[in-house]
Image: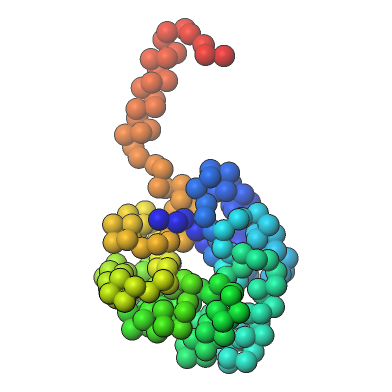
Amino acid sequence: MKFFLDTANIDEIREANATGLLDGVTTNPSLIKKSGRDFFEVITEIAKEVAGPVSAETVAHDHETMLKEGLKCAKIADNIAVKVPLTIEGLKTCKALRAQGIMVNVTLCFSANQALLAAKAGATFISPFVGRHDDIGFDGMDLIQDIRTIYDNYEFNTQILVASVRHPVHIHQAALIGADVATFPADVMKKLANHPLTTNGLAAFDKDWAATGFSIL
């Protein structure tokens, strides 16, 4: 499974990238607002920092304007994945951008039927929002399983990018199902490595090592 960081904070991205575990970055208008920085400035900086795909989202609702925005975003760097909404206008834009060899991340997916449409439009990534699905009383992982089954049935190449991840359990479950990518906040990435037995074991080793009086350096 590929790990993407869902942020527009360059410091978080650099810290995650230093681990060697980061495969890409996703952003959205809310994250850009949170960064307090110019859209093109921050996307350009992220694209230079990360070798993998960097999602930059369009904001228009009509196909013609969305396509213009997408083409402008794609010029930022070769690793830009243009993000479009899962609407008919967004799917038109996806098809047009893919025809030019541009990566496209179709976002705000909440049903398997929507995911099927995105795959038929040639999307590079489909972003089903599991956390928001959970929020309204549905199991977001059922959606991931349905998409995985449909894509495998027809050998679609669109990658399932699990989004709206709230905690490590989402990542665990998505990996078991066979999702291609998970995108999550920096704090969730850190939680993946945390386990009380690891912490307790390290404390015991530290205590015993101190008692030996030895030093490696």
Write down the quadrant of residue 194 in the picture. top left
Quadrant location, the C terminus = top right
Identify whether 140 is placed above or below 11: below
Depth check: 195 or 117 in front? 117
Where is residue 90 drawn, in percent x and y?
52, 86
In screen coordinates, is 68 left or right of 23? right
Quadrant location, the N terminus = bottom left
In screen coordinates, is 123 left or right of 71? left
Identify whether 194 is placed above or below 122: above
Write down the quadrant of residue 211 in the picture. top left
- For the point 44% across and 53% down, which residue is it? 188
- For the point 56% across and 82% down, which residue is it? 99
In screen coordinates, is 14 left or right of 134? right
Write down the quadrant of residue 81 in the picture. bottom right
Depth check: 154 or 183 in front? 154
- For the point 47% across and 91% down, which residue is it? 88
- For the point 30% across and 71% down, which residue is it? 152
Picture colour scheme: rainbow
Where is residue 206 drawn, in percent x and y?
42, 20
Where is residue 213 drawn, in percent x and y?
47, 7
Q: Can residue 57 be seen at all in this image of the molecule? A: no
Depth check: 9 or 81 in front? 81
Where is residue 120 drawn, in percent x and y?
41, 83
